[in-house]
Amino acid sequence: MSLAILKGICGSEVEALSKLSTHLSDKILGEGAGGDYTKMIDLVAEEAAISYLKSIGFEGRLLSEELGEKRFGSADYPLLVLDPVDGTTNATRGISFYSISVAASSGPLLSDVYAGAVMELPSGKLFTAKRGIGAYLDDKRIVVKQPSTLKEGLVGIDLNVQGDEQKMAEIMPLCLYARHVRNMGSAALELCYVAGGALDLYADNRGLLRVTDIAASYIILKEAGASILDMQGAELDCNLNLGERVSLIAGAQNACREALSLLKRGAPV
């Protein structure tokens, strides 16, 4: 399957969202398959993606944060992993940092993902990658930055620990060590910023990330030369289902190792 389908999904969502009234975008419609509230903006974006896939005769499966799994025809693969809007709160509050994230996989694991697209909204910047072809921002090849030390680095960290004091304590040594810290509200997009060198590292230790948040960014990071590790320092992998929740660190290998050593200082003995 070509990247054209992933780009087509992004385009269809952008068109649908451009017609959505601002005052309706944050209307809560219920609880999605991923466990969060589904807002109007999420549903409109997801329905646009489904309509597009039907229009091109797509055969395979779709795993999406709102509806769960939907089959198109009888084929099991490719499996498309979609977050219709990553950063819904930003989008509905008028903060211009949210994204569409969609990946294609040939198997049931994150490591089976072979193509991905993440579109930054509202700018329309498009991050893409396909296994063996490289990672791109629009038409420009991107590679992960190789910082000499995080002491002078710009690090993205999700600090939305939801009252978990231990998680905050674990991440605090990294917050105190890095020169600059950002918490921007769209993991898919922040991971792509790591791939393109705008961020030196991204860390999320909360154990709350879903595969829909990271599947597309995963292959973009890989093709940009980045490492994506779990909190034990192993290469991240997991099942592609909505029940999975993960933590991760992503960046150049030396930056990831430096960050992990810092996080051990905040971990319980």
Image (cartoon, grey):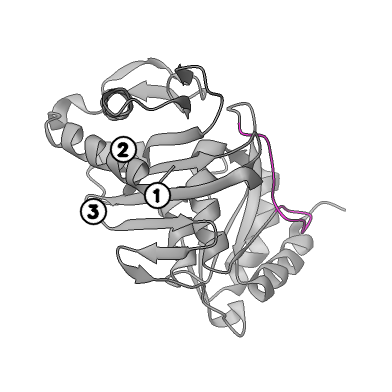
Sooner in the amino-acid sequence: mark 1 or mark 2: 2
Q: Distance of mark 3 from mark 2, alpha carbons?
A: 13 Å
Q: Is residue 14 left or right of residue 105?
A: left
- Is residue 158 at all visible to an observer of this figure? no
Looking at numbered disc 1 in the image, what kind of residue is underneath it? Ala
- The 10 Å Cα crowd at callout 3, few under 14, some 14 to 19, many 20 or more, is some
Q: Residue at x 40, y 43 (%)?
A: 101
User: Outermost residue toward the right?
Assistant: 269
Q: Residue at x 12, y 29 (%)?
A: 21
Q: Distance of mark 1 from mark 2, alpha carbons?
A: 9 Å
Q: Is residue 10 left or right of residue 203?
A: left
Q: Which quadrant, please, contains the N terminus? A: top left
Q: Is residue 52 left or right of residue 206?
A: left
Could you say which quadrant of the image residue 56 lies in? Answer: top left
Tell me the residue that label 3 is attached to. 124
Tell me the residue that label 2 is attached to. 9
Main SS, magenta region, reads loop
Tell me the residue that label 1 is attached to. 117
- Is residue 20 at all visible to an observer of this figure? yes
236 falls in the magenta region: yes
Q: Are marks 1 and 2 in contact (CB under 8 Å)?
A: yes
